[in-house]
Image: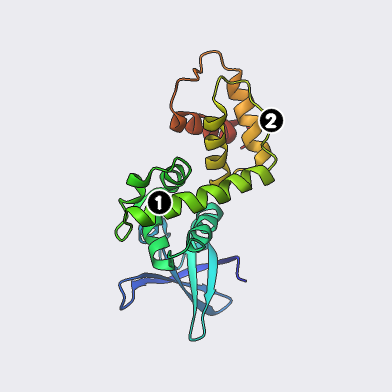
């Protein structure tokens, strides 16, 4: 398994299937990596250094590398293609249409309308993605040991949604619990603010305090 590639950008192009291919040169070998199209705006120039996290798909007739800018994005891609009927190109389309946080929140919150914004994702497919992946993220949350109750005025369901989202974005169980416990002490922080706002505040707190 190739976990990541670190090298220099040799070329960026679209193949005959209109898929965006990043050519990375490392140790005098050029690796073709299919990336999420909107990742193009984040890429350095030709000849500059780059690191991408990868997923290797092996089939009888070919091997394909998929590249992502963050481990959390790569891991969510793996979760998406584990869903029945979701192939690699539809998973790429989901990651291209929705920002990572928006996609995770749509799954955790079972917001199928947001998932349906992706070309090729109909209502039944969106329901299947939300159902299967929310179940997996809930198991992930339990494995991370997030069982303590934070005295923040949040309902158990909302707290679980926040925790699952933050875990899927790449934060550890310990980091998530520290953030929620710290935020719960803020008198000005109302339990009535949206789930998305709680998540943003938790991310900001972790960036500042755990940086």
In the image, residue 70 above or below residue 110: below
Which residue has dot 1 on it? 127
**Residue depicted at 40% across the width and 48% down the height:** 99
**Residue depicted at 49% across the width and 17% down the height:** 190
On the image, the x and y values in percent for residue 56 come to 54, 72
Nearer to me, 209 or 78: 78
What is the quadrant of the C terminus in the image? Answer: top right
On the image, the x and y values in percent for residue 159 come to 56, 31
User: How many residues crowd mark 2 within 10 Å: few (<14), some (14–19), many (20+)?
Assistant: few
Q: Could one spot residue 41 in this view of the protein?
A: no
Q: Examine the image and state in which quarter residue 18 appears.
A: bottom left
Mark 2 element type: loop
Q: Examine the image and state in which quarter residue 176 appears.
A: top right
Of the two numbered discs 1 and 2 on the same chain, state the one appearing first in sequence.
1
**Residue depicted at 62% across the width and 48% down the height:** 140
**Residue depicted at 50% across the width and 72% down the height:** 65
Task: Give the mark toward the camera: 1 or 2.
Answer: 1
Residue 91 vs residue 156: left or right? left
What is the quadrant of the N terminus in the image? Answer: bottom right
In the image, residue 201 above or below residue 168: above
On the image, the x and y values in percent for residue 95 come to 41, 55
Nearer to me, 27 or 51: 51
Distance of mark 1 from mark 2, alpha carbons? 30 Å
Q: How many marks?
A: 2
Specify the label residue 18 is tagged with: none
On the image, the x and y values in percent for residue 153 come to 56, 19
Nearer to me, 191 or 97: 191
Which residue has dot 2 on it? 148
């Amino acid at each position: 398994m190739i976990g990541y590639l670190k090298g220099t950008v040799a070329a960026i192009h679209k193949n005959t299937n209109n898929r965006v291919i990043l050519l990375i040169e490392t140790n005098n070998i050029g690796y073709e990596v299919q990336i999420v199209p909107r990742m193009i705006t984040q890429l350095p120039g030709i000849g500059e250094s780059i690191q991408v996290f990868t997923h290797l798909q092996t089939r009888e007739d070919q091997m394909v590398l998929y590249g992502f800018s963050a481990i959390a994005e790569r891991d969510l891609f793996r979760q998406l293609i584990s869903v029945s009927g979701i192939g690699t190109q539809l998973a790429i389309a989901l990651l291209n249409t929705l920002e990572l946080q928006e996609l995770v929140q749509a799954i955790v919150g079972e917001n199928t309308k947001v998932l349906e914004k992706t070309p090729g994702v109909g209502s039944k497919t969106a329901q299947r993605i939300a159902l299967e992946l929310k179940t997996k993220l809930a198991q992930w949350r339990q494995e991370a040991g997030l069982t303590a109750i934070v005295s923040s005025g949040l309902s158990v369901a909302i707290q679980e949604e926040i925790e699952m989202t933050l875990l899927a974005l790449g934060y550890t169980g310990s980091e998530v619990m520290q953030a929620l416990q710290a935020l719960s002490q803020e008198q000005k922080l109302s339990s009535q603010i949206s789930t998305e706002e709680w998540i943003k505040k938790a991310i900001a707190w972790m960036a500042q305090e755990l940086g």
